[in-house]
Image (cartoon, helix red, strand yellow):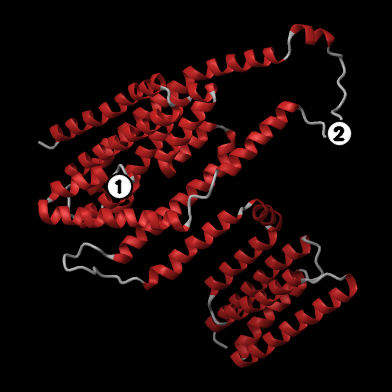
Amino acid sequence: MDISVALALTLKIAASTGIGLLLGLEREWAHKEAGVRSFAITALLGTFSWLLSPTLALVQFGMVVLVALLVNLYAFWKTEHFQITTSLALTATNLLGMSIGAGNFFLAFAGAIAIAALLSWKTELITLSGKLTEREIRGALLLAFISFVVYPLLPDQPIDPWKIVNLRAIWLTVILVSALKSVNYVLLRVFGERGLRYSSLLGGLVNSAAMAFFLGEEGRKNKETAAAAPANMLLAGTAMILRNWALVLLFSLPQGFQRSLATVMVLGPMTLVAGIIAGLAIWRTQPVAQREEEHSRQQEITPSEQKSQPQTEEPPASGEGTPVGAGVEEQAGQQKRQALKSPLSLGSVFAFAAIFLALTIFSGAGRVLFGTTGFLVVIVLGALASAASSAVLLGEELARGIVASSPAAIAMLLATIAGLLENIVIFWFVARQPAMSWRILLLTLPVIGSGFVMVMLLGVFQR
């Protein structure tokens, strides 16, 4: 036998044994009947049979399935519990062994790692499935549907004589933005309970206008939330500015970083200035919030009550042993979790698709009729409906070379300013606190001013 052939066979046997040992060790740690030896032999059986004959491999695979069924019947008769997961893992291990016999090492190793992860993450997956809501499951299924079912069915060429509307390109944008919103929603759901600041920052990435509406409602109901509203609004604005230039960069990056450099140079410092002002606002409001919290705690128990209160406290009659304050906090956290809804629904997907399609048509028509100026005007006005849509559209047009770098930066600056002012107006009408709204506006002016300064410096450097 040739040495190269012997080495190839040795490598396949070693890889098959390794995969069987990996999966068998996990089952051994889980205290299952089928362990290291069973999985290793099953993987080697698949490899040997495929090396001898693919037909023999199919026959032995049927035997493995039959053995798995008999083992399940015996386990059910003995303990009244099926070993479905272990049986499926054993069958999959046999297929992975056959894949190694066919020379497809990548598929075998990737499949083994995925199966081992699913087996070892049993507790985490069960916990996650218990926490998921019906709306979130529907959102995940909807994202999979629009990505793997709808997208391949759309034509990959413009459908109009002016070559403005490409349905597949538009739908790809819908998929990417929906995926980003879903990721941001997961982050918001995980970190949102730690404080309104996390919610403001992450909510600004999802929808800054909706976050302004939420902060306005909270500020109208709660004085403490109203005091922290300027800092939270600036956090939401910081996230919105960051999202805008990141989307422009993301969609123009296939044609190089140079085309979106001007936009990043204008909006990047605005993000930094907004973050610094938000940090200063948080630093100033935090001591006030701590003093108000201590004052409210002192008011809860008067001096006369402190004297009459016994030294040892009996547990509550209900037997739960949970303080009243903790119960109130838990109830408030539960209400926040219930109020937090998945951003991905059929209505939201079609709404974004309709907005982006309208912006594409209007911007294309404006470009055809009025040149670059008409296109940029549509970008700025479109930011009032969806700043993310305007940023994505501008990034795509930069990638195509339809609009120059400097005019795009100016248009994105004006669109971002429109979004910031729109959020303040929304907070004004919802919170019904003019003084607080004026304060937010005054704190936002340096952010806007930094953008104009960067535009002027950009113009000086380009001369």
Q: Which quadrant holds the C terminus? A: top left
Image coords of residue 347 (percent x, y): 44, 56
Image coords of residue 430 (percent x, y): 43, 31
Residue at image x 16%, y 52%? Answer: 366
Does the rendering let one see residue 251? Answer: yes
Name the element at disc 2. loop
Residue type, mark 1 in image: Ala
Q: Which residue is labeled 2 in the image?
A: 319
Q: Which mark is residue 19?
A: none
Q: Mark 2 or 1 closer to N-term?
A: 2
Direction right: furthest residue: 78
Is 159 situated left or right of 100 in this image?
left
Residue at image x 35%, y 38%? Answer: 241
Name the element at disc 1. helix
Q: Which residue is labeled 1 in the image?
A: 391
Task: Please state the total of marks drawn on the protein image.
Answer: 2
Residue at image x 58%, y 17%? Answer: 290
